[in-house]
Amino acid sequence: MASRARTKYYILKKGRHVSIYTGRSPRQAALKAATRGVTEIKLRERGRRNKDRTYSVHIFKGGRQKVTLGSENRPDWLPSKVWKPRVNKVRVERVKTLR
């Protein structure tokens, strides 16, 4: 039986503000960031370097849209309108130093 992938931590810097999002993949963390309204998403995995001593920065373009849920598919505590995130991966940059 294959073991499940562990949760990874991804760092999003916006000016001096630092946010940490969790997920098994960069896309999962980017979806969480897009749900909170971030559009330019640059994520770096915390505590990980590549073999050539560079960092991988995953760049996404994201957004969110308010959608209406049907009453048959949602529990009572969930509101009828929720945010649905969308992200597209633009590229992966390799940087030597962190800013």
Image: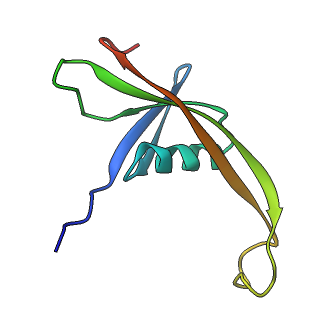
User: In x, y percent, where is residue 30?
Assistant: 53, 43
As rendered, which of 77 and 84 lies closer to the eye?
84
Give the colour scheme of this rendering.
rainbow
Quarter location, residue 61: top right
Relative horizontal placement of residue 49, taking residue 62 as reference (left or right): left
Q: The C terminus is located in which quarter?
A: top left
Outermost residue toward the bottom? Answer: 72
User: In x, y percent, where is residue 53?
Assistant: 19, 18
Relative horizontal placement of residue 46, taking residue 23 as reference (left or right): left
Residue plotted at (27% across, 57% down): 6
User: In x, y percent, where is residue 93?
Assistant: 41, 20
User: In x, y percent, where is residue 36?
Assistant: 65, 46
Q: The N terminus is located in which quarter?
A: bottom left
Quarter location, residue 43: top left
Residue plotted at (78% across, 72% down): 79
Q: Is residue 27 above or below residue 66?
A: above
Relative horizontal placement of residue 49, taking residue 57 as reference (left or right): left
Residue plotted at (40% across, 39% down): 10
The count of marks equals 0
Q: Is residue 68 above or below residue 37?
A: below
Residue plotted at (19% across, 66% down): 3
Relative horizontal placement of residue 91, taking residue 51 as reference (left or right): right
